Image: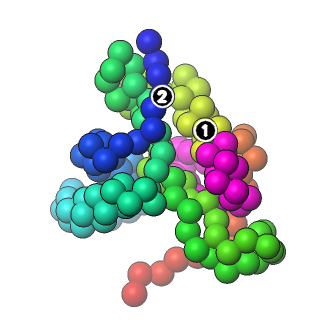
Amino acid sequence: MISTRPIRADDLELVCLHREQMFRETDAPGRTEAILASQTAHFRPWLAKHLGDGSYFGYIVEEHGKPIAGIGLMTIEWPPGPSHPTQDRRGYVLNVFVEPSHRKRGIAKALMDRADHEFARRGVAFAILHATKMGRPLYAQLGWSATSEMAKSL
């Protein structure tokens, strides 16, 4: 039996594990195990803080009580712009992960639908995410579009 529940503070290690595995599977070069370990060591206290104050929220999907997928959500301050001219915040989707054994079953789509509803419930009218190569087709199918964002490490 598959069920979905809100993320809880005691999901900290699960979210860290999913995030690390998600980045391990991305198409970006230079993602060594040492970098992933360092990232997780710094992400863990950040996540504990934001799970604790409720600013990081989302859902965990379980099958017979065992976690098989998750999604993280946040609202972030952002100046009003053409995509959300009356709001000073936007939704942010992160850490979407489905165990390989459970992919292609509609779980990620269901999580994204929950994200849409949760943002709407919170009055957020615009959301962003950073897509992996694997996730892009699903997001496009759900109406997400590519933006002109660029990045640079300093």
Residue 126 among those drawn in magenta:
yes
Residue wearing tag 1 = 114
Q: Residue 68: x percent and y percent?
A: 38, 29
Residue furthest top in the image: 1
Residue depicted at x 43% and y 56%:
54
Residue 58 among those drawn in magenta:
no
In depth, the one of 154 and 124 nearer the eye is 124
Q: Which numbered tag is attached to residue 88? A: none
Residue wearing tag 2 = 4
Residue 138 sits above or below residue 150 on the image: above
Crowd band around label 1 with a 10 angstrom C-alpha radius: few (<14), some (14–19), many (20+) = some
Q: From the image, which quarter does the N terminus lie in? A: top left
Residue 51 sits above or below residue 87 on the image: above
Location of residue 83 (image quadrant): bottom right
Residue depicted at x 46% and y 50%:
57
Three-letter amino acid code at disc 1?
Arg
User: As drawn, is 42 to the left or to the right of 101?
Assistant: left
Residue 90 sits above or below residue 88 on the image: above
Q: How far apart are marks 1 and 2 (CA)?
A: 10 Å
Q: What colouring style does the render use?
A: rainbow
From which residue to which does the magenta span run? 116-137
Q: Residue 18: x percent and y percent?
A: 34, 44
